[in-house]
Amino acid sequence: MQVHINAEHPEPRKIAQAVMALERGDVIAYPTDSVYGLGCDVLSKRGVEALYRMKNMRPDQLLSFVCPDLSDIANYALVSDSAYRVMRRLLPGPYTFILSATKEVPKVLRMKRKTVGVRVPSHPVTLALTRALGRPLVSTSASVDGEFLIDPAEIEDRFPELALVLDADGVSLTPSTVIDLSGEEPIVVRQGAGPVDFV
């Protein structure tokens, strides 16, 4: 089901509708400041399993934790002082940071995981969604065979198991920039929507 939502001022009623779907263990599609994301509640085993199934992902493929702000990140990732400084400068924004995982991550994803991807997108819909849920989304991009989908109707068509597609402006075809902060020095893993001249 597609729900058109205001990209600048998301209607609380529509955000509440999406949160209800997430709390039921459903997977939804939602806009970010880069591409569309497919996400579920971080506490939903059913949702996480459905996400892997929908995307035909291997168990070792990385899902991101989409957080409303930096304060949530410490529950799931070990953040050094230097990593925190980089993230504070760039978030919210179109970046995914790879960090060393805390012990909470394997519990959530039910698998061994040394690192975790963390995002705080600047899109008002994503921020409203994660704030209303009160915890992170486990997320991956809405893509098929490496092709990013930005048409809500096509996303719904390709992923019929979705409970909801939040249709909003402000989405691009360029994925987030991925930066590995789990080591001594930042490493750009994928150049995407965010500039990397600071690395």
Image (cartoon, rainbow, N blue to C red):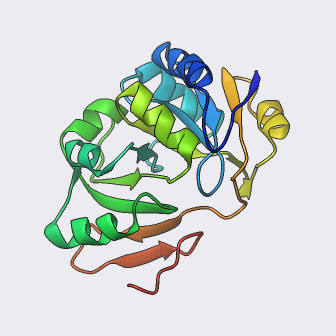
Residue 16 x, y percent position in the rendering: 53, 19
- Please say whether residue 110 is visible from this viewpoint: no
- The residue positioned 16% from the left and 65% from the top of the image is 80
* Rendering quarter of residue 39: top right
- The residue positioned 84% from the left and 39% from the top of the image is 154
Which quadrant is the N terminus positioned in?
top right
- The residue positioned 28% from the left and 37% from the top of the image is 106
* Rendering quarter of residue 8: top right
Quick check: 47 above or below 63? above
Residue 145 x, y percent position in the rendering: 73, 53
Which quadrant is the C terminus positioned in?
bottom left
Residue 51 x, y percent position in the rendering: 56, 33
Quick check: 145 above or below 108? below
Quick check: 123 above or below 51? below
- Please say whether residue 117 is visible from this viewpoint: yes
Q: Nearer the viewer, residue 108 or 172?
A: 172
- The residue positioned 56% from the left and 49% from the top of the image is 123
Residue 159 x, y percent position in the rendering: 74, 32
Q: Nearer the viewer, residue 132 or 178?
A: 132
In the displayed structure, does residue 188 sit left or right of residue 146? left
Quick check: 21 above or below 132? above
